[in-house]
Image (spheres, grey):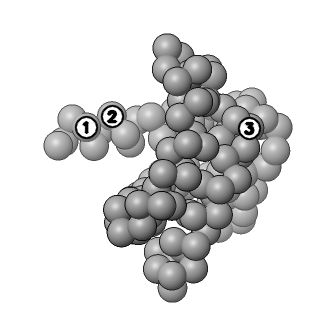
Amino acid sequence: YGRNNDAVNNAIMEMVRERKRTGKSADDDPDVLDMLLSDELYAGNDLKVANDIRGLFLAGDETCNVTTANFLYYMTMHPEYHQRVIAEIMPTLEKASNDFVNLLSPDVVDEFVYTKQCVYETLRICPSGP
């Protein structure tokens, strides 16, 4: 646990240092890290920035887990919806099966209209946060 914890802390600190050095995110759009680094509250305190980034990451991870679990539950309870989701995503997944990282981009996933509707309905029924 300690070694993994150190690795995560080091990775986040390196991300903070790199962002301060370059001044921009990978896609040039401002993100949460940019907001924290530009806030007076965090001025000169990279550790505070890193700790808050870590907290946001962990909080986001849990909400994704809950949403995914609820989505899968509803798919098992409604096989007709499950079949439509499978029919929508399988052709794309089969094409990308040899290289998910490069071939399954956010733009490609964004085309899963029915699947997104099912996820949104899951969030409507069981919101993962307050």
| Residue 104 position within the rendered picture, expressed as x and y whole percent measured from the top left | 61, 29
Q: Is residue 92 above or below residue 61?
A: above
Of all residues, the one furthest to the front in this rendering is 80
| Residue 18 position within the rendered picture, expressed as x and y whole percent measured from the top left | 63, 31
Q: Amino acid at mark 3?
A: Asp
Q: Which quadrant of the figure has residue 2?
A: top left
Q: Give the residue pinned by disc 1.
A: 4
Residue visible at 48% across and 41% down? 12
Q: Earlier in the sequence, mark 1 or mark 3?
A: 1
Label 3 SS: helix
Q: Is residue 56 above or below residue 34?
A: below
Label 2 SS: helix
Q: Is residue 26 above or below residue 74?
A: above
Label 1 and label 3: CA atoms lie apart by 32 Å
Label 2 and label 1: CA atoms lie apart by 5 Å
Residue visible at 73% across and 44% down? 111
Q: Give the residue pinned by disc 2.
A: 7
Q: Local crowd at mark 1 within 10 Å, few (<14), some, or many (≥20)?
A: few
| Horizontal arrangement in the rendering, residue 85 relative to residue 62 (left or right) | right
| Horizontal arrangement in the rendering, residue 117 relative to residue 48 (left or right) | right
Residue visible at 55% across and 52% down? 84
